[in-house]
Image: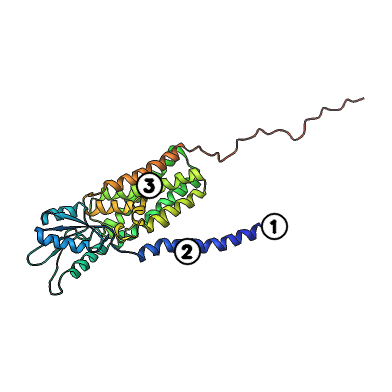
Amino acid sequence: MSTAPNRRAVAAILLVPLVAAFALWAFAWPASRIAPRDLPVGVAGAAPAAERLEQRFEQRDGAFEVHRFADEAAARTAIEERVVYGAVVADPRGPRLLTASAASPVVSQLLREAVSASVPEDTPVRVTDVVAAPSGDPRGSVLGASMLPLALAGMAAGAMVTLMGLRGVRAAVTLAASAALVGLAATVVAHSWLGALTGDRWTEAGALALTVLAIGSAVAGLAALLGPRGIGVGALLMVLLGNSFSGVTSAPELLPEPVGAIGQWLPPGAGGSLLRSVAFFDGGAAGGAVLTLSLWSALGLAVVLLARRTPTTAEPVESRPAHPAREPAPTG
């Protein structure tokens, strides 16, 4: 009896726990190490008081990246342009904290705790939410949960193009059309129904479509280069690493290094940052995310367009008689 089936069974028994352990590491380890790492914050106000606030932030070595602003107006502008997550304004009546819960509810709460711990207990800290999260999603749960469905949609598009044997222009058009429809459908759900997004609907649909296109093109391109195993590589990059390293549920600066930076170079992380920018900040700081998603899309589509089409059907073979015709035997 052949031992091949037994070997395959043993390989499956060993492979499944390894995949489960890797997935648990990819999702659980970054979440268990959340802490500020060079988190951009601002300090504004008169020099003596502002310097004391800056020193308090710098006492936590490596946790915050402090930006100095002349006044509150400049700090508000920096928050709205996504230069900093928040700012502390030195005031004679006590420090005032400017936050942006739309950028990250987790960071907003972290800044509240950090500023409250740095002042005397009897000193109140006034908080102003400059760019508040929408009432339909005050904790950012909808936006944080949106990246996994988008990653799965991109995976499905890339896998279907591969399994259906599409190549060239037809494959590129299929990927682009499916991404556009996913972007429109996701915008209807997240913006119109759930009220989790508050920006321009068409801009949000474009950001979502670009994210799905980047993922689908990458998967299809990997499959064109590596064959069906490229779909598995795409799932590893986009679903396991890309989604877990995206920082959408918290912030890239809260994840362990270099996880946060890696996540922003993968489509799910870049797509989450782009969606925040266009939904709440009028496109502020969206250039890097657009560039990342465009590069993934362009490279994936280029490979799909240049890949040679594999024949799916054999050319018909001219039928011939099984035996040559025999001449009749002479008579007499």
Which residue is at 64% across, 34% downward? 317
Which residue is at 56% across, 41% downward? 312
Which residue appears farthest toward the left when viewing the image? 92
Marker disc for residue 21 = 2
Amino acid type at mark 1 = Ser
**Kind of element beneath mark 3:** helix
Marker disc for residue 70 = none
- Label 2 vs 3, first from the N-terminus: 2
1 vs 2, front mark: 2
Using residue 174 as the reference point, say whether residue 88 is left or right of it.
Answer: left
Using residue 87 as the reference point, say whether residue 173 is left or right of it.
Answer: right
Residue 293 % position (x, y): 34, 46
Residue 77 % position (x, y): 15, 52
Amino acid type at mark 3 = Ala
Using residue 298 as the reference point, say whether residue 331 is left or right of it.
Answer: right
Marker disc for residue 2 = 1
Q: CA distance from mark 2 to mark 3?
A: 27 Å
**Foreground pick, 63 / 18:** 63
**Foreground pick, 224 / 320:** 224
Residue 239 % position (x, y): 41, 56
Mark 3 lies on residue = 214
